[in-house]
Amino acid sequence: MPAHANEVKNYDVIVVGAGAAGLFCASVAAGRGKRVLVLEKSNKVGKKILMSGGGRCNFTNYTIEPEHFISANPHFFKAALKRYSQWDFIALVDKHHIEYEERKHTQLFCKHSAKDILNMLIKECSDEKVTIKTHCNIDNIKKDQDSNYLLETTHQDKPLDYSCHSLVIATGALSIPTLGGSDFGYTLAKQFGLNVTNRQAGLVPFMFSDNLKTLCENLSGLSIPISATCEQNTKNKEQHFFKPGPHQYIPNFSESMLFTHRGISGPAILQISNYWCPGDTIVIDLLPELNATGWLIDYKNKQGRTKFKTILQQQLPKAFANEIIKLWWSTLEDKPLAELNDKTLTDIGSQLNRWKIKPSATEGYRTAEVTLGGISTNEISSKTMEVKNQKGLFFIGEVLDVTGHLGGYNFQWAWSSGYSAGIAV
């Protein structure tokens, strides 16, 4: 691409991407006296912040532990999370008098609006004299003979060129392209010789193409409490982003499952999607508080005249109970429990506690909250987020091969990685 014949504006630091990681990194760097420019291709900053947490922004979690993150290198993110912890970000939130509340699983949400977090980041940048430009497309990035980074950009159809000593890439990943998700960071990483791992939609709903599709359509909008885990197909071992080691295991997520007209969603399902690849089996416990077999046999011994359908409707929403009876046990619907032998009840109990399903696919990046995989952390300093063999080039946030669970962990990674780069640029 031909160079622009424009005067070049110089900054100490240029941050590409005005999301959570980018804005926070910019404010930290500027707070150290650096002249900082943030470039954002869309019309507004922080779009994903505003839609997160149902508009309330689950900005961190009281419990930040390594087991809440997935990466090919399960140690990479530890240094950053320790350097800038959840307590540090909570202190910043308190400083700005933002009201928040703790929800299930020690998740922290804004009491009023996600705008509170975005406005806080914008104010931090404003107070430190950070320059932010939206509607800015980057046409080319290269290094000059003095090891400065030259950025050829177009701002509202007008070419503008910039240079900087430190370049921070905070462009996010492929998830939710309507909010700015793109492969820009990966393309740039490859340009500078970095390895990019396989990527896949994460924290994403599942879809079905078999008879479960009809069941899900019939129950669309219904939410039930479940526990979910994943049985990985060993034939897909190399495709999995989480490969259980000697002291690791695939978690069991106890939360709600939501039926949709395409398949299943809800917190428990989004969580387990991070561990799934095509061909894997999802195992769902429909009665996570009960040993279903013991419960059925005990009920039979005490109240054997009760119809099978009636007892199932006592523990599960009626609409759901009716659908699974129709699907699995249509001949038993009106039978009293006394007429069902213990083996039949054991089989029913096993199905209720270990319902095995094979999704045909996920909904993909269109609705995924995160992107699994990304720029390999092998070539990134865990202390500074700087590329080891490219001085002055930093990658932060979701563009890296670090993915958090649902619950504020991906935002905490944005704050922690952004801070690490912000104090190093």
Image: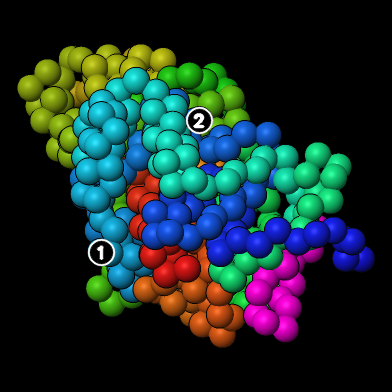
- C-alpha separation, residue under disc 1 versus residue under disc 2: 27 Å
Front residue of 51 and 356:
51
What is the image's colouring? rainbow
Q: Position of residue 363 (x, y in %)?
A: 61, 40
Answer above or below: position of 297 versus 411. Answer: above
Mark 2 — residue?
Answer: 51
Q: Main secondary structure of the magenta part?
A: strand
Around disc 1, counting alpha carbons within 10 Å, would you say few (fewer than 14), some (14 to 19), or many (20 or more)? few
Q: Does the magenta portion include 150? A: yes
Q: Which comes before the other along the chain, label 1 or label 2? A: 2
Residue 362 seen from this side: no
Q: Residue at x 89, y 61 (%)?
A: 5
What is the total number of numbered labels drawn onto the structure image?
2
Question: Quarter-wise, where is residue 341 in the image?
Answer: top left
Q: Position of residue 286 (x, y in %)?
A: 32, 34
Q: Position of residue 78 (x, y in %)?
A: 30, 68
Front residue of 357 and 139:
139
Magenta stretch bounds: 139-151
Say which element carries label 2.
helix
Front residue of 295 and 49:
49
In the image, taking residue 158 as reference, residue 83 lies left or right, namely left
Say which element carries label 1.
helix
Locate the N terminus by quadrant.
bottom right
In the image, taking residue 249 as reference, residue 200 lies left or right, namely right
Mark 1 — residue?
Answer: 82
In the image, taking residue 43 as reference, residue 71 lies left or right, namely left
Answer above or below: position of 154 versus 211. Answer: below
